[in-house]
Image: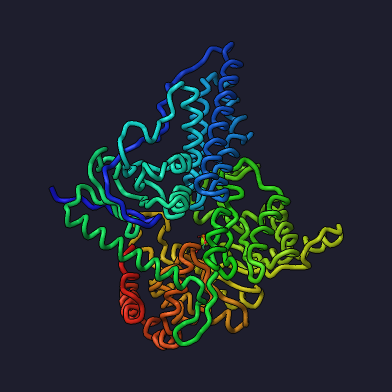
Amino acid sequence: MPHRLIHGIAVSPGIAAGPALVVRWEVPEVPEQAIAPEAVDREIARLRDALAFAKERIQAVRRQAAERAGEEEARIFDAQLMILDDQDLIGGVERLIRDNHFSAERAFALKIVEWRGLWSTHGSPLLRERLADLTDVEIRVLTRLLGVDEPDVLADHDGPVILVARDLTPSLTVQLDREAVLAIACEQGTRTSHSAILAHAIGIPAVVGLPGVLSRVKTGESVILDGWTGTLMVEPTPEDAARARARDEQQRVFARELAAEADRDAVTGDGRRLTVRANLDLPEELSVAVNGRAEGIGLMRTEFLVVGRGRMPGEDEQYSLYRRVGESFPTSEVVIRTFDLGGDKFPGFRAAAENNPFLGWRAIRVCLDHPEVFRPQVRAILRAAAKARLKLMIPLVTRIEELEATRRIVEEEAAALAKAGIEAAASVPVGVMIETPAAVLIADQLSRRADFVSVGTNDLVQYTLAVDRGNARLASRFTSLHPAILRSLDIVRRAAAASRIEVSVCGEMASDPVALYVLLALGYRTFSVAARSLALIRWVARRLRAEDAEQAAPRLLVARTADEVAEQARAAVRQLVDPRLLEPA
Ligand code: PEP
Ligand code: MG
């Protein structure tokens, strides 16, 4: 029988071959059950027991995670513990029991459906990714209430297996025994989902986002998972297996090559020094960035402080975190991006659901409308900036007024902190993310008033090409090599240069070796890349020649299509860099 090859997203490298074990860590079915009015108190007591039980189990798993993967990774479970403590959630469930006489399990399931709906329509990919935490919590609470056993991942099989699941939630991942699980294959998930981060930390090869894998693979079938290319091969032939082994060896050799050069700076073949910083999505990645020798953090996303919690983070909590991240880079800068939140879910107040959240009440718009959210963040950054080299950056800017208003708030808060005798920096540099066509077209005006600009190519591509960044059907149309994006990048770089301010790229484009060539051609020298791509990007940079790339810029800028740009860039990079890098991952 010929093999079947399923393509997904590679999230943790390595190749494994063995029998599949299909597991279903799934939310149990909840009967539609009402209770008698006199049973309300008993039902609420059952709910509290289940919440306490779930908390205990998650704390146990957290301890296990700390032992297996380390304290940073174990912190992922704090998000789940916070969901269980959320007064909005628990109060809402109790109200459904009291007012509607729903059983505890039905009330809990309904409330989770409501939360899931709000989170999944959210513009922020991070919030969507936190759905895995919500599912973990839901499974634990409902299995307790319904008196059914939590699914046991590793029951019923002999010997090592390749685990196949819908979405490997954080709890499941950490319960895995490295000896018993050779690799992980998931139907859902993205490159930055928690499970991906954990699988990588534990060192298990993993591929996520494999369409239909649950129905296409049966327990016991032989499979090969390739965590380098992001594929799962079902019923491989012996030749397939030999090829996979050869590829694994080749990748290991390359990984050793990267590691051997990990200490070397990003200096191009013709001697131009580049700056390569890291993006930080979650504090768990801090050690990856530090160990990867990031020259600071070019984009610290702060949404995780809000997402999945029932309340806004306090100023002191933010201060400690920003200070900790800042102090991890004593000789370089850390750029804190202010909350890039959407309008559908917000602790403390709630906006009406929006028909078009990507064009809705988001990011800097929300912050400026709600000073009680924004000002504590600004104060925390100013206070931490007394201890570390921090900068503040605002997302989704479309109007100069947004920058001016932010500057006023920074000045006012700095003055208030000084007056109150609280230790804080007198000011912090304020930068602007260039993520919309509007920001590109007024980049000259923004550059005259900002201390620095950074191009967020993920959103810039989305808004310029009108292609939803999360829509798999449009994935082939979502490209940073479109001529419109190249022209935008050119405009922004020139505008920043005219005002003599720093310009960088912090979108995913900078983590792609071929796109890096294009960015060098357009004159970019400062990048912020995925923490795991640091060594690769420096390795590629050392093999490229900035001057040659710059000479190609006029040709790249008149290319008619993204394919033409890609072809020119690939051809140039292929001459200089090992072609293995250019294979689709
Ligand atoms: C971007 O849009 O390119 C960016 C870096 O921000 P985010 O991915 O958080 O929207
Ligand atoms: Mg963005």
Percent x, y for residue 535? 47, 69
Q: How is the image coloured?
A: rainbow
Establish if 155 lies above or below 199. Answer: above
The image quarter containing residue 164 is top left
The image quarter containing residue 91 is top right
Residue shown at the point (45%, 77%) measured from the top left: 541
Q: Nearer the viewer, residue 274 or 95?
A: 274
Task: Determine whether, in the image, residue 244 is placed left or right of residue 531.
Answer: left
Task: Determine whether, in the image, residue 510 is placed left or right of residue 444.
Answer: left
Establish if 162 lies above or below 505. Answer: above
Percent x, y for residue 397? 58, 65
Task: Determine whether, in the image, residue 255 is placed left or right of residue 316.
Answer: left
Q: Nearer the viewer, residue 526 or 400?
A: 526
Establish if 112 lies above or below 469. Answer: above
The image quarter containing residue 245 is bottom left
Q: Nearer the viewer, residue 353 or 521?
A: 521
Residue shown at the point (49%, 63%) measured from the top left: 530
